[in-house]
Amino acid sequence: MRRRRRAVDVGPKVDLHCHSDSSDGRLPAEALAEAAARAGLAALAITDHDLVPVLGHGDRQFGASHIRLIAGVELSTMHEGKELHLLVYFPDAMPTEYADWVRARTVWRAHWFDECARALGLDDGIRADRAAMEGRRTLTRVHLARAVVEQGVAPNLRAAFNEHVGHSSTVIPPLNVSFLDALTVAKDCGGWTSWAHPPPRHAEQWAQRFSAAGLDALESHRPVKSARNRLASLAHKNGMGITGGSDWHGWEKRKMGSFRVPARALHKTDRALRLVNETACREP
């Protein structure tokens, strides 16, 4: 008779990377936070692209479910001709100086969207809306891809990305901030930084340099497990921590909260961001 394995209590679970409909996600931020809380997550970072957190930070209650919101953002940057994404977090409120810098990035993205639309030959009606121009929502390649499909330039989103708006596009204007410059701004404002979904070969090439420049962590824990140990080992080798997140947008089949990371597994990040308020947290 086989013995049943005892369940190991690994403590509160968190998700430090997801998106609301204020950038290219499906759900409004409030609904996203509620879904995460009801799924049993203890802490959540809604890291919309180049956008100040629309829900701020701190403890939230949804019925009997409690969750702590971590102030965060995902920045789109360039390094040696490659688009890289930088996650920036704060244990408390995002500092005003940094929020102003991020908001300027949001507005720049709105103008970038218009440049892209013109470069792709899209109708004049496909332009940034007022909310984007005022820095209240971010327009991304996903929005461009949808516009390309709606205009009949591509049959579907996959083709739109592959042939028109993806990172390999020679038509789309380049981003105007470097990874290292964005990292410097974040660190000067007290942010905890992580390289989002780093391609392993590029991580092995640049992790040491980025660590020396102040990068705090690599995002090693993601739904795709193939490179998890490789990235975690690389982070440790270079004196960095690790982060983990679902990169959930709401368009995928999996539910919010189906991917979760034990806060204690993130070590340095757990301590830096005070991920879990042990007195308030309630395990599912």
Image (cartoon, rainbow, N blue to C red):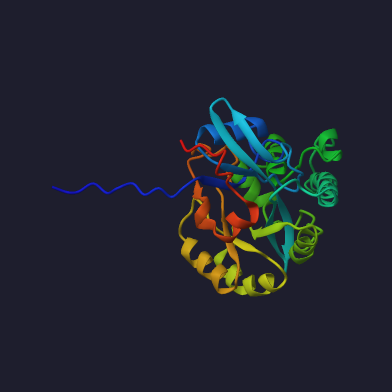
Residue 184 screen position, x and y as percent = 78, 64
Residue 73 or residue 126, whichever sits in front: 73
- Is residue 28 in view from this perspective? no
Q: Position of residue 153 (x, y in %)?
A: 70, 41
Looking at this view, is 76 or 117 the one in front? 76
Please say if 189 is above or below 282: below
Q: Residue at the spot x=86%, y=39% of the render?
A: 133
**Side of 149 relative to 245 (left or right):** right
Residue 187, image quadrant: bottom right
96 or 158, which is in the foreground?
96
Instruction: Estimate the x, y position of residue 76 in percent, counting from the top left.
Output: 72, 54
Residue 157 quadrant? top right
Residue 62 image point, x, y percent: 59, 28
Q: Residue at position x 68%, y 35% from top?
A: 21
Tell which of 20 and 128 is nearer to you. Answer: 20
- Say how many tags the image has: 0
The residue furthest top is 63
Q: Residue furthest left?
A: 1
